[in-house]
Amino acid sequence: MQSTLYEPEHAAFREMARAFAARHIAPFHEQWEAAGVVDRGIWTEAGKQGLLGTDVDEVYGGGGVRDFRYNAVLDEELTRIGASGVGFGLHNDVVGPYLLRLTTDEQKSRWLPAFCSGEMITAIAMSEPAAGSDLQGIKSSARKDGTDYILNGSKTFITNGILSDLVIVVARTDPDKPGAQGLSLLGVERGMPGFARGRNLDKVGLKAQDTAELFFDDVRVPAENLIGTEHGGFGHLMENLPQERLSIAVVAVAGCEQMLETTVDYVKGRTAFGRPIGSFQNSRFVLAELATKTQIARVFLDRCIVALNAGDLSAVDAAMAKYWTTELQNAVADACLQLHGGYGYMSEYPISKAWRDSRVQSIYGGTNEIMKEIIGRNMGL
């Protein structure tokens, strides 16, 4: 079934993004995997090509087009070549909306030009050692001292954690308000005294993506770095999480499509018992089932992107998209690796990397168990 989501201008953007990735990312990604971090220069190159901040107003150096389809195209093209270490999706899809919707004119002028040029890499710090999907359990605190905030605490599993220059930190600004109440978002900048980075975490997959621990020891954050409303952080997170979860679903579906394409090519060429393994009924049935589920996932994903652009994407639909597509991605990865046989377990085969990289998709952005809670509660259960 032919997707009707994209228009000619998106096709042109895709060609540009694909050429950029082929020249500036694909030849170097393996060495970035070994280093555990991408070359910072790739960010400024992306900025020059207009790949960052496509939805940011032109006055700040952005593309000036509020259309998530451009974000999706870039996410798909990076997934297509296995460029799981390049944190453009976190920057554009997740952090971008906070800076666009919640910042003051002064903050926009201060942060957005460098956001679009790639000179300022961003991250968002929610997860803590004892609070992952449970945002109400956040312990990091920011007490008022005059008009400033004194931030203390730690975060973990932070994407772009090593390279980031601006981190949106979720902290408790009112200790007397329980649970979700009393949280605020603070913009913590590289070089602020007391802000330190811990380990670049050694993960099962996403080896080139810098995922770090962050520590805050009496970091003085000026009031001018409060993002959104004081004590309104949880509400701001809930408003922006649907787009984050949809971004994860985009990568999931693109990953399914790429793994299937790779595996179909493999089973056509690999022989066993004197015939291509793709000619065996089991191979055909497994791939037919996965191709059907992937096509259905693509249709639902496309519909969710249309809804997001129209401002109608609900938290429930985003949860459904994130849960279903990432579960499917892991199922496709496992089945496709199995069809590769012993070669699938060899690191030099792309399917092994896709298998490793896929696993975290059902965990971050809120675990899939949390997604089911959101869906179930909406059913009155």
Image (cartoon, rainbow, N blue to C red):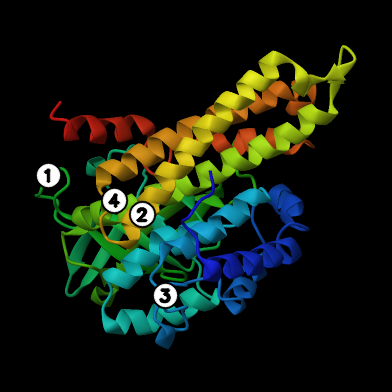
The relative height of residue 330 versus residue 136 in the rendered view (above or below) is above
Task: Check disc 3 and report its element: helix, strand or loop.
Answer: loop
Q: Which residue is mark 2?
A: 243
Q: Quadrant of residue 271?
A: top right
Residue type for callout 1:
Pro
Residue occupying image coordinates x 12% and y 44%: 178
Residue 158's spot in the image, x, y percent?
46, 50
Q: Residue furthest top?
A: 273
Mark toward the viewer: 1 or 3:
3
Dot 1 or dot 3: first in sequence order is 3
Residue type for callout 4:
Ser
Tell me, yes or no, whether the two marked residues, 4 and 1, touch with CB atoms within 8 Å. no
Residue 325's spot in the image, x, y percent?
45, 37
Callout 4: few (<14), some (14-19), or many (20+) C-alpha neighbours within 10 Å?
A: many
Dot 4 or dot 2: first in sequence order is 4
Q: Quadrant of residue 146?
A: bottom left
Q: Residue furthest front?
A: 1
The C terminus - image quarter: top left
Q: Which residue is mark 4?
A: 140
Q: CA distance from mark 1 to mark 2?
A: 27 Å
Residue 224 left/right relative to 301: left
Residue 70's spot in the image, x, y percent?
49, 65
Q: CA distance from mark 4 to mark 1?
A: 14 Å
Q: Which mark is residue 65?
A: 3
Callout 2: few (<14), some (14-19), or many (20+) C-alpha neighbours within 10 Å?
A: many
Mark toward the viewer: 2 or 3:
3
Q: Residue furthest bottom?
A: 59
Tell me, yes or no, whether the two marked residues, 2 and 3, touch with CB atoms within 8 Å. no
Q: Nearer the viewer, residue 142 or 279?
A: 279
Q: CA distance from mark 4 to mark 2?
A: 25 Å
Q: CA distance from mark 1 to mark 3?
A: 39 Å
